[in-house]
Image (cartoon, rainbow, N blue to C red):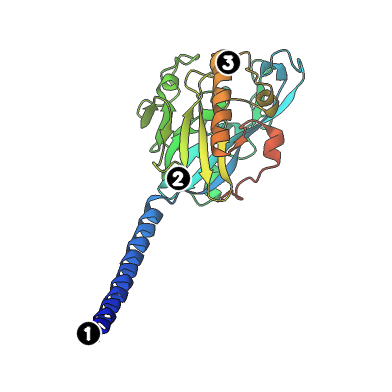
Amino acid sequence: MKTVKAMKIMCKSLVIAVTMAAVMAGVVLSTRSAVAQVEKPGVEKLYILNCGEGRAGDQSRWSPGVNVGVPIDMVDSCYLIKHAQGWFLWDTGVADAIAAMPEGQRPENPAMTQWRRPKTLAAQIDALGVKPADIKYVAISHTHPDHIGNVELFPQAMLLVQRAEYEWPSPLGVGRFKPEHPVTKLEGDRDVFGDGSVVIISTPGHTPGHQSLLVTLPKTGAVVLSGDAVHFKDNWDHRRAPSFNFDKDKTIASIQRIADIMAQHNAQLWINHDKAQRDGQKLAPEFYE
Ligand SMILES: [Zn+2]
């Protein structure tokens, strides 16, 4: 009898112990998930903004020996990303001042792109209820004018640019950015928010410090924003480097690097200037999540 009683007591205490352990585990688990929610919310949404539309007189500028003398329509995209830690803008397009020019900005060389600006960047951001001062980071793929036209709309935003690009002497002999603009000069890749959801990847070649962006969205999944690592899908498919690129070998190596990253992350490639692709995408105020 004594043994049975003792066993009953033991059983009871075991039940109590197990219950207490479960409760404690539950507490631990819920605390953990709360921490995870605070620390790893990732990207909430991404808007594609119209940052220019244009026509170039000779596609072969970008595809040497192919489609010589054939005009090509291009778009210029900016991407506004909402992360729980702040707004992040990728590229700024052609200057907003071009919106006031009915025919757009005529290039010196007709083979190059005549850019128009159907909408200003400022107006598109404003329409989303975002103030320029809300933008925490502005990262630019490179320093060509169709990507940095509006950096100074965001004088307080931290500019994220490769050191090699920032220090690349401007062909015009003038600074591309105001010297007082806050800047982080990167030397390679950068996980911007520390959670892997917005990662700048170094892809030199088009220019000395060209960079692309790996974004991971909660529903859409991983996307690589090309910058000008390639200009349109045909060049991606055929691994072509435009004749005016800074370094052809680095261009091809960077295309391969992007392909490897895409395979690793099961990512899509969104090509900044590819009109056919962008015509099938949602533009702000619609968004990707
Ligand atoms: Zn470029």
Where in the figure is residue 92, as x and y percent of width and height? Answer: 52, 34
Q: Residues within 10 Å of mark 1 (few under 14, many from 20)?
A: few
Depth check: give the residue in front, 260 or 178: 260
Where in the figure is residue 103, as x and y percent of width and height? Answer: 69, 29
User: Which image quadrant for residue 112?
Assistant: top right
Q: Does the residue labelled 3 lie within 8 Å of ligand 1?
A: no
Q: Residue 245 carries which label?
A: 3
Amino acid type at circle 1 is: Lys
Question: Could you tell me if residue 181 is visible in this image?
Answer: no
Disc 1 to disc 2, C-alpha distance: 70 Å
Where in the figure is residue 78, as x and y percent of width and height? Answer: 56, 37
Please say if 262 is above or below 57. below
**Residue sitting at x 65%, y 46%:** 282
**Quarter of the picture for ligand 1?**
top right
User: Are the two marked residues, 1 and 3, in contact with CB atoms closer than 8 angstroms?
Assistant: no
* Residue bearing mark 1: 2
* Residue bearing mark 2: 87
Amino acid type at circle 3 is: Asn
The mark that comes first in sequence, 1 or 2, is 1
Disc 1 to disc 3, C-alpha distance: 90 Å
Please say if 33 is above or below 66. below
Query: On the rendered image, what quadrant is the N terminus found in?
Result: bottom left
The mark tally for this picture is 3
In this image, 10 relative to 151: left or right?
left
In this image, 168 relative to 234: left or right?
left
